[in-house]
Amino acid sequence: MATYEFDAPLWRWQARASDVWTFVSLPEALSDEVLELGEPYARGFGSLRVEATVGDTVWRTSIFPDSGRRAYVLPVKRAVRDAEGLTLGEPAHVRLRLIDVEPRRRRA
């Protein structure tokens, strides 16, 4: 399975007063690799199913392409932020495993 690790700060997106989401953005180079590898497996809105780990917290969710940031974004729910003591603007260490994607086989 394709697995990646990276550090990225938490940021907030708000569409309306009632819709507030917290994300981390995958680094641009990593997003490019994930797009290339995951494109055949993309679901609605170009999302890819993942298993995410931050600290001791593991959860399943999806990452979504964000054309404005030229990166995939990972939603980080409140339960994860509270359990791991994460705050906006501070980096989180993320381990991400693509669920439906088979890694490329290297040629010998």
Image (cartoon, rainbow, N blue to C red):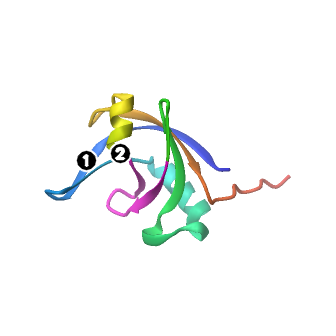
- Residue 56 rendering spot, x and y as whole percentages: 50, 30
Which residue sits at x=34%, y=28%? 85
Which residue sits at x=51%, y=44%? 52
| Crowdedness near tag 1: few (<14), some (14–19) or many (≥20) residues, C-alpha within 10 Å | few
Residue type, mark 1 in image: Arg
Main SS type for the magenta part? Answer: strand
Q: Does the magenta stretch include residue 68?
A: yes
Residue type, mark 2 in image: Lys
- Residue 62 rendering spot, x and y as whole percentages: 47, 56
Residue 64, quarter of picture: bottom left
Q: Give the range drawn in magenta.
A: 60-75
| Marks 2 and 1 close (CB-CB < 8 Å) | no
Q: Is residue 62 magenta?
A: yes
- Residue 45 rendering spot, x and y as whole percentages: 42, 70
Along the horizontal axis of the image, is 106 left or right of 86? Answer: right
Which residue sits at x=32%, y=61%? 68
Kindly state the secondary structure of the residue where label 1 is placed: strand
Residue highlighted by disc 2: 77
The answer to whether residue 9 shows anywhere in this view is no
Kindly state the secondary structure of the residue where label 2 is placed: loop
CA distance for labels 2 and 1: 11 Å
The answer to whether residue 59 shows anywhere in this view is yes
Residue 87, quarter of picture: top left
Q: In this view, does 40 lie above or below 92?
A: below
| Crowdedness near tag 2: few (<14), some (14–19) or many (≥20) residues, C-alpha within 10 Å | few
Farthest residue to the left: give it: 17
Along the horizontal axis of the image, is 48 left or right of 81? Answer: right
Residue highlighted by disc 1: 12
- Residue 34 rendering spot, x and y as whole percentages: 55, 56
Q: Which of 106 and 61 is in front in this view?
A: 61
